[in-house]
Image: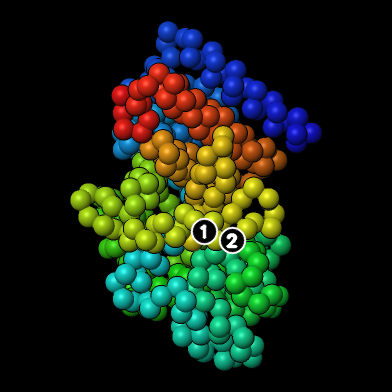
Amino acid sequence: MRKALRVATVLSCVLLQFLAASSPAAAQNSGPDATEFEGAIKAAENMPRIKSLLISRNGELIVERYFNGTSPRDIANVKSVSKSVISALVGIAIEQGHIKSVNEPIGEYFTDELSADGDKSKAGITIEDLLTMQSGLETTSNRNYGAWVMSSDWVDFALRQPLELPPGLVMEYSTGNTHLLSALLTRATGMSTLEFAREALSEPLGFRLASWPRDPQGIFFGGNDMEMTPRQMLEFGELYLNDGRANGRQIVPADWVAASLRPLAKSTRENNRSYGYGWWIRDMAGHRTPYAWGYGGQFIVLVPEFGLVVVTTSSSYPGPDRRAHTRQMYDLVEYAVVAPASEKLARAGSAGTDLLPGGE
């Protein structure tokens, strides 16, 4: 059933792309040079959970569409896209000297919690282990998520999870890892994660990051439930596409961006996905594509070869159609955005012209 649904979605995207390319109204309500993405727009119009689709090329917004009653000013719960933002904050904190390096053990920051736990080996978990989801601690996500967020102390709960494997060996996705990073940032900088995020990241990008939920001790939720508009998500994606530079300044260190988008851990759930520092990496239409992903269909997708950033937001509420929608979103991005861009580059190359990246 799942395979049939995926095939149907792919065929739908391809067919819509073909029909859109031959339509005289192909670029209606889209920016210049966006005709090859009209198939993506048409496919999105038939998705009841999608809220927005934005595409920029070389810093120019060429597609901006909102669906199902959403407006440009609406803030989206970006769910686990937040993990990519937390990663950026860690990189900035290291650059500013608040944290020594990714190799620093977390025992330096959680002395009281770890001394009470009794498992001294947990103190050797590094910041990089948390960033790459290789802490070795049993996950706080999935089967354990409800018990974790209902607990009276999220940091203590995450650190008391049993050490199932030596740190740094195997990836196990866990929002507890990024919440520990939020707590660590708060202790290292002397500021709340929100204050540091506004000062060091969002305000240099030109917007004020909205507040988001905190744990019972007041630590801002690390790796979930941040709120951003789609255009703010696009600004963050553009920042990473441009090696951490925006508005004439280096906001995130360039070497941090490069490390974040490099496959450092292999997903144990899907063979075609890897993980960097808070970013997923997979091939789409034959091109390595880093992306920030959040529950329900929140995406910031980077296609560096073509200078593209793709942003989508969707309903973040559970429902029987959520998983199918997420698969459809992957297919939409791969087959109705990345594939047409790749085909355009191939046509440009065969014609001896230079269309992507860099303009026409």
The x and y percentages for residue 263 are 54, 56
Q: Residue at x 50, y 70 (%)?
A: 128
Q: Residue at x 41, y 56 (%)?
A: 258
Q: Secondary structure at mark 2?
A: strand
Q: Quadrant of the N terminus?
A: top right
Along the horizontal axis of the image, is 143 left or right of 232?
Answer: right
Q: Amino acid under label 2?
A: Ala
Outermost residue on the top side: it is 24
Instruction: State whether residue 301 is above or below residue 89.
Output: above
Please say whether residue 264 is visible from this viewpoint.
yes
The x and y percentages for residue 282 are 57, 46
Along the horizontal axis of the image, is 113 left or right of 65?
Answer: right
Q: Earlier in the sequence, mark 2 or mark 1?
A: 2
The x and y percentages for residue 224 are 51, 58
Instruction: State whether residue 308 is above or below residue 147.
Output: above
Please say whether residue 137 is visible from this viewpoint.
no
According to the picture, the residue beneath numbered tag 1 turns out to be 276
Q: Residue at x 70, y 54 (%)?
A: 269
User: Could you tell me how far apart the alpha carbons at marks 2 and 1 are, in whole angstroms?
Assistant: 7 Å
Q: Amino acid under label 1?
A: Gly
Outermost residue on the right side: it is 1
From the viewer's side, name the closer residue of 86 and 261: 261
Name the disc covering residue 30, or none.
none
According to the picture, the residue beneath numbered tag 2 turns out to be 265
Q: Residue at x 45, y 43 (%)?
A: 302
Q: Secondary structure at mark 1?
A: loop
